[in-house]
Image (spheres, rainbow, N blue to C red):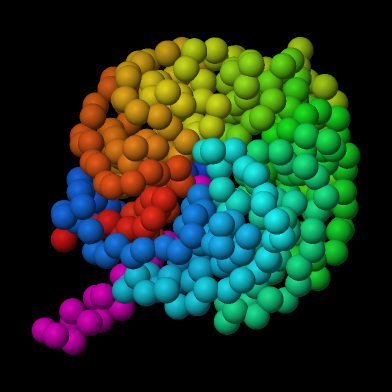
Amino acid sequence: MRLLLLLAVSYLHACAEDWPQFRGPGGQGHSREAGLPFEWSETDNVRWKVALPGLGWSSPSIQGETIWLTTATEEGRSLRLLAVDRTSGAIRSNVEVFHLKGSIPVHGKNSRASPTPVVEGDRVYVHFGSYGTACVRTDGEILWRTQLAYDHRHGPGGSPALYKDLLLISCDGYDIQYVVALDKRTGEIHWKTARAGYQAYTTPLLITVNGRDQMISPGAWRAVAYDPSTGEEIWSVRYGKGYSNVPRAVFGHGLVYICTGFDQADLLAVRPTGSGDVTDTHVAWSGKRGIPLTPSPILVGDEIYFASDNGVATSLDAKTGKEHWRQRLGGNYSASPIYGDGRIFFLSEECVSTVIAPGQTYKPLAANRLDGRCLASPAVSGGAIFLRSDTHLYRLENR
């Protein structure tokens, strides 16, 4: 019997789904894991809780038995990569990647280590905005470092994305704006495409439409789809005064869903089949009520769900934009929701997780509180939810 139990545990670990980037395997907040907890507290369903040095709002990236996080210590001057053991919570390594000089201001809700790392094989790609971008081997050796010049003003935000041998980054600064592809083997620029606009903090989303790959990159005033191999612009959609965009786009039902940012918080559903400026021809529908400025939306089945920054959750028909329900959750929201095991998980800045069943009526299942502040989006792997607060990393699972 003991041997069978050991084999079962080994099988579960071998089959655990990795969460290698911001918002998971497909970049849209979905997990295929089963048996996830939906109730927890500081004393219930906590496998372990480990204190983290410094401050960072990067989400956990998970591959195999290791969780990767960035943080900033020494009053934000030491930018570091942490490796945490998934089973025990022990910090395996703590590598300084960059060291800053002087005082570097950031927005009160931000940190100097907010972009989420991307892990692939024995490489971890970290981005600290204009403070630096690097590739670190999983044994801690720094393979390359580079700096991308732009003034993000409020601190770094958008995370990188991998495409074949390229690391894709949106660099929308207060001064200049561009998107760039770095050779993931060397850190050298493969292509760089300038664009006009203003500051934004988004993460590219990779999709395939009619056999052609597209990189969706929302920025100030407009969102653009690029050819990820060359940086060539495929199509764009304008949205007036929207800027300081944060949410990552989502894709499904033949539509790309884009949040337009501050001053003009709309949700656009765009058909990604056009070329050039498609504002007047390819916007299937738009929504204006309760659109988030910071959390990303999530698409589950035929509905799209989102929570506004001030805690109002909404469900719309993803194909038409018709509202199904709207519900005040309470609290404030920066983290993006996740979906797994048939449930949607919203996480407030006050570390309250509201768990609901997806559907055309609002069906709350639980509200779970932990200590501290929570601005990082959760991750899922091996039947567990990994949640980062301002001081700790939690492994939450049914016990």
Locate residue 339: give its quadrant: top left
Locate residue 293: give its quadrant: top right
Q: Which residues are magenta?
A: 1-23
Residue 188 covered by magenta stretch: no
Q: Main secondary structure of the magenta part?
A: helix
Tell me if I can see residue 330 in this picture.
Answer: yes
Percent coordinates x, y for residue 387 in the rendering:
37, 52
Q: Is residue 318 above or below residue 61?
A: above
Which residue is pictured at 49% across the width and 55% down the height?
55
Q: Is residue 342 left or right of residue 338?
A: left
Which residue is pictured at 24% across the width and 26% down the height?
363
Which residue is pictured at 70% across the width and 61% down the height?
100
Q: Quadrant of the N terminus?
A: bottom left
Q: Compare residues 290 and 15 and report the one nearer the observer.
A: 290
Residue 7 covered by magenta stretch: yes
Q: Compare residues 355 and 387 and report the one nearer the observer.
A: 387
